[in-house]
Amino acid sequence: MNRFTRPTFSMSHIARRALAMSLLAISMPLLAQSPDHGQAQRQAREPLPLPMEEVRIFTEALDNIRNAYVQPIDDKTLLEYAIKGMLAGLDPHSAYLNSQDYDSLQETTQGEFGGLGIEVGEQDGFIKVITPIDGTPADRAGILPGDLIIEIDGQLLRELPINEAVELMRGEIGTSIVIGILREGEPETLKFTLVREAIEVASVRQRALEQGYAYLRISQFKVNTGEEVLEALTDIKAEHPELKGLVLDLRNNPGGILQASVDVVDAFISEGKIVYTQGRHNQAELEYYAHEDDPSEGVPMVVLINSGSASAAEIVAGALQDHGRAVIMGTRSFGKGSVQTVMPLANDRAIKLTTSLYYTPDGRSIQAQGINPDIVIEEGLVTRTTGRAGITEENLGGHLRNGNDLDDVVREPRPTVTAEQVVVTDYQLQEALTLLRGLNILESARGRRPATRLTETRIP
């Protein structure tokens, strides 16, 4: 296998050592070959002059640790630490993958793994929940983004490396685990008992918001996400033959595989560039374009994003924004605009190295900038007022009748939306649906407007 594999996008990290493990749902690079990587392999193997003074200092430091550290430590472990430190010093997303991490990476990109279904990172020595995965034990138990996991089965996790904490959360399918959560606004530690499952993540799900309006959520970008989106669009159109609007929800989507994000954008546009990448080597410079067909048939769209939307999710939002294909709503995205390539090493180990940056069709780099929504809508809860209905003109005694209010005219009732038809606690989703309704009303009004001015008829 070539040392260079297909470039992909990994999820955002809360801190430098936030590493995806098998129980997490973060999207990892797909281990497959790309064209023209033989040249990259040759370039990577070309000998470069070494700074001999720094090499001498390194070997001297290594020798001092071997001989003077308080406990004996073998050379293999020391050199592995050196590799980890070298990669960790580059950027938050480059990392060394031991054999276990490497296996986990390949499992997660296929969308099936064992665990609780939590995407986690590390913050200030604590394990922070980035987001629970839809439909998993963590999601059903009510674990929320931003929760801090401080203990597992009574063991405190303060300063415990993230990979060791993840190991504690792993276990045999069907066994239970108790995790302690610190949550903002809660005075005491919350305890959750979860049962481990084989997590098979469906990255796409859809449902109706109301007649003519649909909701499509992508929770991560894995190998077959593009196919799942096409299937979802087919189901949506079957349920709504006259589809008036679609909400695409990318909130708390940590990213994933580059090709998957390209496939998703391609489902909504019929021409033009989707994304391109630039790096030090020619093979890192890739361009992706849309095909002529448009499975979405141009349906009006609103895309929801927030600070948890990263990487591949930002590719989709940025491309649809640049093409004027959708209104982007929510809050600014995470800002991960770099591409990681997995380079296998000997003995089933690998390094995950940042090799290029990606750019939207208009040439915007999202790195540390993110996608700014067209309409900023902060997260919030929707509440409904109750009580007496407001007084209108028709409630006043002796009000004038209008010319349309005739006994022989039957007025059709206006369609209503019940609380069950919309997630009423989701303010951003409510606003997206409201915007789509408005766009549809405006378009309908334009359709009713005569195309040419009528000739004036004079009556003598």
Image: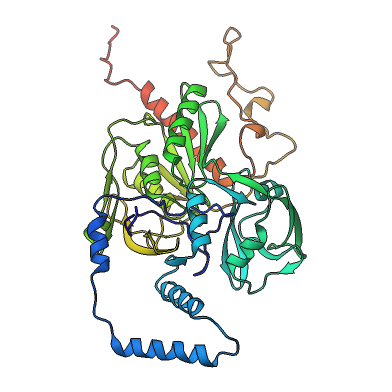
Figure quadrant of residue 159: bottom right
- The x and y percentages for residue 350 are 42, 63
Tell me: 81 left or right of 386.
left
Nearer to me, 246 or 74: 74
Which of the colour schemes (rainbow, by chain, secondary structure, one colour) is used? rainbow
Residue at position x 50%, y 89% in the image: 65
Closer to the camera, 16 or 452?
16
Quarter of the figure with the N terminus? bottom left
Q: Is residue 356 above or below residue 114?
A: below
- Horizontal and vertical percent position of residue 337: 38, 59
61 lies above or below 28: below
**Can residue 12 be seen at all in this image of the molecule?**
yes
At 61% from the left edge and 50% from the top edge, which residue is drawn?
114
Q: Quadrant of residue 407?
A: top right
**In the rendered image, which quarter contains the C terminus?**
top left
**Residue at 27% across / 15% down in the picture?**
456
Number of numbered discs visible in the structure rendering: 0
Q: Position of residue 332 (x, y in %)?
A: 46, 56
Q: Is residue 368 visible?
A: no
- Side (left or right) of 262 relative to 303: left
How far across and down, in percent of the image, does residue 16 sit? Answer: 49, 70
The residue depicted at 60 percent of the width and 87 percent of the height is: 71
Q: In this picture, is 203 found above or below 156?
A: above
